[in-house]
Amino acid sequence: MRLEPLANPSRYRVLGVTLAALGVAFVLVGGLFAAYGLHPLEAYRAMLSGTLLDAKGWQEILRRSIPLLLIGVGLTLAFRTQFFNIGAEGQMLVGAVWAAGVALFVPLPPWLSLPGMVLAGALGGALWCLVAAWLKSRLSVNEILTTLMLNYVAQSLVIFLINGPWKGRDARGYIYSDRFAEYQQLAALPGTNVHWPTLLLGVLLALFLQLMLTRTTLGFQMRVVGENPGAARYLGIPGGRVILWVALITGGLAGLAGVGEIAGIHHRLIEPGQLSSGYGFTAIIVAWLARGNPALVLLTAPLMGLILAGGDLLKVSLNMPFRIVDVFSGVMLMCLIASEVFVRNRVRWGR
Amino acid sequence: MGEPLLRLQNITKRFPGVVANDSVSLEVYPGEVLALLGENGAGKSTLISILYGLYRPDEGEIFIEGRPVKIASPLDALRLGIGLVPQHPTLVGRHTVAENLALGIGTPLLPARRIVPLIERIAQGYGLHIDPKAPVHQLSPGEKQRVEIVRALLRGAKVLILDEPTSVLTPQEAEALFQVMRELKAAGKSLIFISHKLEEVLAIADRCTVLRRGRVVSSLPTPEASKTKLAQMMVGRSVSFERKRANPQMGEVLLRVEDLQVRSGRNLPALRGVSFELCAGEILGIAGVAGNGQSELVEVLAGLRKMEGGMVRLAGQPLVANPARLFAQGVAHIPEDRIHMGTVPSMSVAENLALRTFHQAPFARGFLSNPAAYAANAEARVKEYAVATPSIHTPSRLLSGGNIQKVILARELAGQPRLILAVHPTYGLDIGATEQVHRVLLEKTYQGAGVLLVSEDLEELLSLSDRIAVLYQGRLRGPYPVGQISREQVGLLMTGGEA
């Protein structure tokens, strides 16, 4: 077997290879199901029938797609500009903390409280990300390390707050904050947990950022900085400043996702593990699949939402640990990254 | 002459959309230097890749000493006695010469120590002066190349392919290389010598084979060849080698550099008090072996690097260290590295042509980009500079080196630049593209631009420049008017000698 480089892989090739990689991932995870003592097809049938063929299932997919959409859009932009933000999880938690802080402690008129929470959440996430971006542009500290490590700081911060100073008066043995007031909760589709204002915001932002990237001067600068930093220096485009902008956007979107989770579903600040179920990491795959196009996240976020919702079902109906979805995402990401070689090369057999 | 050591018969290699080698036949005899000539894209690289086992031919046969062979990998090639001396050395900088050479052939235990005597024997046998214990990163380009030659010989090469070996060498170093080549020849080795520099080919080759568009145009003994004849065969029409510069019209002093001191990226002194003046309408050539301060000089003038001391004035005003503002003031920069600096390879030709002006009308309306302006600008520039591209929306990485350079020229020289910083503007370009670059630069000087031309190609410097200065270890010698200095004198200054 030999590989011959392709100068310009076609769109169909990219799509075909991506689908094939996902197929391989499903087969590999199927093997894991089998090792767990389940028939793989049975497991997949359970996942699909409980999600795509079921009204409640659709709600679950949508609910889980919202944070993936918001974070995924921001990460797509970040990856496109070579700012490898692995810390969306932490930025989401900090966004939730700031929003909760406003909800619990800032005396705002009721009509202003929710907008205040949204703004504070976005700002919190953005500033958390800015720490890493500033270290990168000033001191050339690798952002993969800083953003990743800041996740743990954010987790500890949430746990500290809800165990100590922000612990709810009615919490007793549990650890969470006080419940938000009615007017501090995001509207949801009737009878569901789908907080639609956040969903709508995510859809609009995906389209808006797609336009920004392709049709504005700031987007042009971001692409130059991301695709050829040497050219950015040569042209006098301030790469550091562009990266700060990208960090603000990607962190801010993750912060918004955090606001959505607490103001739309839980209505209080809760433990990191329950608040997020790893959205910040799963969104990395969402962004990877979108290949640098924020608008494509509109497709890839629901796909991962489906897998997360399916993971819930596996837990409930087939008694598997929920963390199977982490294995799922991990295998998918590995297959996708490995498949890159088949996007860029043609395979030839024989001599 | 007997039997050829290596013979290619009707080698054909097709790539999507092109026939890179079209029924190419050639042979090399023992004790012979064969020059392989051709423009970029003529098929030389493909042919070498086939010989070295990197590509397999679609048709045709290869014979070594009369036996048909299949070369499936570089390992096969080495086993069959074919060695390649690559254009850019592939050595591990932190390792010593011996350690590098031991890679792949040494014994598992202390491989480097065992082959030192072997290296010394081979090196002495052919007049290759290298110290096996020296770390490779301390070696000059010429020395690294000698290490590559020894490597091929260690592996038992009978046929040595030298891919543009002189492109990184000073004239003196090149002469030393030719001496080694003569020794190898005398020892019965076959050499395939690839070069763009015709006078070198005439000096060292026994026969010349010229490729054009994948076909062998001609194969002739060197005594029957001349520079004009070879160039004509390469491009398929006549080419002039006259000095291209006619009556320069110099104006006011445009650029005044006084006692400029600059540190390199590794914080070592790169320029130690450089002073010169450049007039409007003048071409000032800067010669020198790479790494003697040329990059730093250009970077300061382009606003990419801070100066440590001294003064630079552009049209009387102190220079602002900001590339975007300098461009707006009329400083065009044709950078050394087309791929990593001059273009964004993943962006379209149209976007690359707008890299300098994307934030201004008509390319931008407020924050919004105007795709129609990109397209209109690109159509006009592509036509003006005859850029060969499938479409203005093609990513620039799919273009050939010459066309990428045309895109850069078209972008940088649009409008009326006052100062043009041109760094190796024709490096790796074929004769046709080189002529176009030279013509455009000359045209701009007649319109009043001053050109700082940094090049390692002495032919180019001597045929274009009005004055030449030489950078050696951060100090500038000259400038000397071109008529008052010879090629050999420039070569001496480049290596720190006295002219």
Image: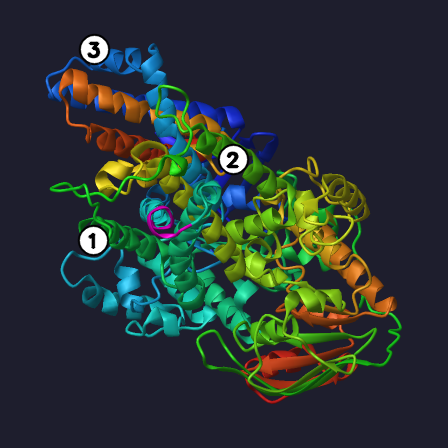
Give, as a three-letter code, the residue at label 3.
Answer: Glu
Asked if labels 2 and 1 touch by Cβ distance under 8 angstroms, the answer is no
What whole-number distance in Å separates the C-alpha atoms at marks 3 and 2? Answer: 35 Å
Q: Nearer the viewer, mark 3 or mark 2?
A: 2
Callouts 1 and 2 on one subunit: yes
Q: How is the image coloured?
A: rainbow
What whole-number distance in Å separates the C-alpha atoms at marks 1 and 3? Answer: 42 Å
Callouts 3 and 2 on one subunit: yes
Residue neighbourhood size for the residue with mark 1, other residues' Cα within 10 Å, grouped as few (<14), some (14–19), many (≥20)? some
Residue tagged 2: A206
Left or right of A43 in this view: A246: right
- Residue B72 appears at what percent x and percent y? 37, 36
What whole-number distance in Å separates the C-alpha atoms at marks 1 and 2? Answer: 34 Å
Q: Chain of mark 2?
A: A
Region of the chain picked out in magenta, as a range: A101-107
Residue tagged 1: A160
Q: Nearer the viewer, mark 1 or mark 2?
A: 1
Residue neighbourhood size for the residue with mark 2, other residues' Cα within 10 Å, grouped as few (<14), some (14–19), many (≥20)? many
What's the residue at 46%, 81% (across, down)?
B268
Residue A42 - label: 3
Identify which residue, A266 or A198, lies in the foreground.
A266
Left or right of A205 in this view: B277: right
Which structural element holds mark 3?
helix
